[in-house]
Image: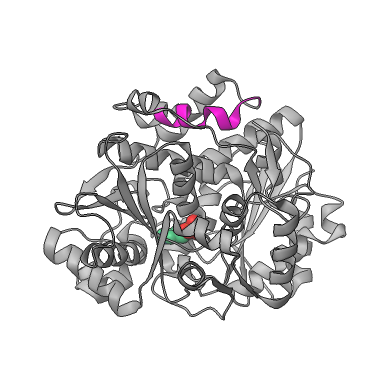
């Protein structure tokens, strides 16, 4: 498979190339040159396949030329054989029409594990082939950092420096990063906010003192391999609900537009998806873009769903490219103007193309808490607040009859409730326990370095600790 940039001027790359590159050299994001499409008969033949085998089948066309069938099968068996639930992403029924797709059975209790566990192995495989060393540098407000660290800890040819804002991530999130003891993992607690940490990381990727000496790698969802891995659970859940002979709707708690874009890809590949509901918290740039065509960045308001507290949604560019006629030159100009002014209008083609599949909803804190209370009262399920934003949207869409009555709605459950147990306890009066498989998270020793807020301190740390 060949991949092209959304901004039209970076060279086309193969799967190995885009996995190691992250962002394209023209500032765009990589997408496959065309969508592989499965016929109804081919989709029907996937029924009953265990998750690892299904994952290999769905990902095969995307990795063609970079991994052999045997390599891919082995990779999927290793990665998905090691989740806390035999079904990897089990589907749970809430009532006649509402379902939850539990994506939090990986090692760090959020859906990001589903893709990052795979990405860790891909990095190791591709870097060994090239006899290259890569330094991953990232900033996190919680979930990405822990999932990325757990994915690369102890792997060959790759190291990771993860910055988190000191005192501003939850205890569980911090400990999931800092109790990992591996020679290739470095945690930095910086004096400052998440935005400060993120700014340091972005600057490092443009700093010739760093890029001239190290190959830097990225683990955020601009990396195509992450989205590819997430396409699998849309197939998996739709098949269980009767696809290809029945259509399904999804509600996806959204921040960077990664997880829900994977749903769009599943639809392009042939999964009969009636609607994708983009569920945002009050940081609602996507809701405004999809409902009014207004894509303009505001400040970030902290919420009880911190993994969705974003200013702009990087992966939205992928959708704009695909529904807007795949004109890289025009999109490159549109995005350059957006980066200068922090605001843009969708074109008619973009707005209509998006409206064909996407609906959006926004949940404030009360609505989110009410969704948690509904799930607990009506079904006995304790859900996390991010899932609550998605469930609010599912219930509201159902009530407003926005989706035909006989179509099941699946809410993606993106985190285990114990990961956000303070907010859960405030909403329903129950404090969820950590699952046994995370072990004695609070008994383990923590390893991290405290560092000042200036860029140079972080840069020097990275240069000093990189193995070359
Ligand atoms: C990252 C994250 C999200 C948002 O996912 P995107 O792919 O950025 O839209 C939602 N919920 C949880 C728990 C997350 O960690």
Q: Is residue 449 left or right of residue 237?
A: right
Q: Position of residue 5 (x, y in %)?
A: 70, 47
Q: Position of residue 80 (x, y in %)?
A: 42, 34
Magenta stretch prevailing secondary structure: helix
Seen in the picture, residue 169 relative to 464 is either above or below; the reply is: below
**Residue 456 appears anywhere in the view:** yes
How many numbered marks, from 0 up? 0
The residue drawn where x is 27% and y is 39% is 246
Seen in the picture, residue 164 relative to 36 is either above or below; the reply is: below
**Residue 175 appears anywhere in the view:** no
**Rendering quarter of residue 20:** top right
**Rendering quarter of residue 65:** top right
Q: Position of residue 185 (x, y in %)?
A: 61, 51
The one of 8 and 425 positioned closer to us in this rendering = 8
- Image quadrant holding the C terminus, namely top right
The residue drawn where x is 23% and y is 73% is 370
The one of 268 and 391 positioned closer to us in this rendering = 268
Whether residue 64 is in magenta: the answer is: yes
Whether residue 303 is in magenta: the answer is: no
Q: Is residue 445 left or right of residue 19?
A: left
Q: Is residue 237 left or right of residue 133?
A: left
Q: Which residues are magenta?
A: 54-65
Q: Is residue 194 left or right of residue 361?
A: right
- Image quadrant holding the N terminus, namely top right
Q: Position of residue 354 (x, y in %)?
A: 49, 58
């Amino acid at each position: 498979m060949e991949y092209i940039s959304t901004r039209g001027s970076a060279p086309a790359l193969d799967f190995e190339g885009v996995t190691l590159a992250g962002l394209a050299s023209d500032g765009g994001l990589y997408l496959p040159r065309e969508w592989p499409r499965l016929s109804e008969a081919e989709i029907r033949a996937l029924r009953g396949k265990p998750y690892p085998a299904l994952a290999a089948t769905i990902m095969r066309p995307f990795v063609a030329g970079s991994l052999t069938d045997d390599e891919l099968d082995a990779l999927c068996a290793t990665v998905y054989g090691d989740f806390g639930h035999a079904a990897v992403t089990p589907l749970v029924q809430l009532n006649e029409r509402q379902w939850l797709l539990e994506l939090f059975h990986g090692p760090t209790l959020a859906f990001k594990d589903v893709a990052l566990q795979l990405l860790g192995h891909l990095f190791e495989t591709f870097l060994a082939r090239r006899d290259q060393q890569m330094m991953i540098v990232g900033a996190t407000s919680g979930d990405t950092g822990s999932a990325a660290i757990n994915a690369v800890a102890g792997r060959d040819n790759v190291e990771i420096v993860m910055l988190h804002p000191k005192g501003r991530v939850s205890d569980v999130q911090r400990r999931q990063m800092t109790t990992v003891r591996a020679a290739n993992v470095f945690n930095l607690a910086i004096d400052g906010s998440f935005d400060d940490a993120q700014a340091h990381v972005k600057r490092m990727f443009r700093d010739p003192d760093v890029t001239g000496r190290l190959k830097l790698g990225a683990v955020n969802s601009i990396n195509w391999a992450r989205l590819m891995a997430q396409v699998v659970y849309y197939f998996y859940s739709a098949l269980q609900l009767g696809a290809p002979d029945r259509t399904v709707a999804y509600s996806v708690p959204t921040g960077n537009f990664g997880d829900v874009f994977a749903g769009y890809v599943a639809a392009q590949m042939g999964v009969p998806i009636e609607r994708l509901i983009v569920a945002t918290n009050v940081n609602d740039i996507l809701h405004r873009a999809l409902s009014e065509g207004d894509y303009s960045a505001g400040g970030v308001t902290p919420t009880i769903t911190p993994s969705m507290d974003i200013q702009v949604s990087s992966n939205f560019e992928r959708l704009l490219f695909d529904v807007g006629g795949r004109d890289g030159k025009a999109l490159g100009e549109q995005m350059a103007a957006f980066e200068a002014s922090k605001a843009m209008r969708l074109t008619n083609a973009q707005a209509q193309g998006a409206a064909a599949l996407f609906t959006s909803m926004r949940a404030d804190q009360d609505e989110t808490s009410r969704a948690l209370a509904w799930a607990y009262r009506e079904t006995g399920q304790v859900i996390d607040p991010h899932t609550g934003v998605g469930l609010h949207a599912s219930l509201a869409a159902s009530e407003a009859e926005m989706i035909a009555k006989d179509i099941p709605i699946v809410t993606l459950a993106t985190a285990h409730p114990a990961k956000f147990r303070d907010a859960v306890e405030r909403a329903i009066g129950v404090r969820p326990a950590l699952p046994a498989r995370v072990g004695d998270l609070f008994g383990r020793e923590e390893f991290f370095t405290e560092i000042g807020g200036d860029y140079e301190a972080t840069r020097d740390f990275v240069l000093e600790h990189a193995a070359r």
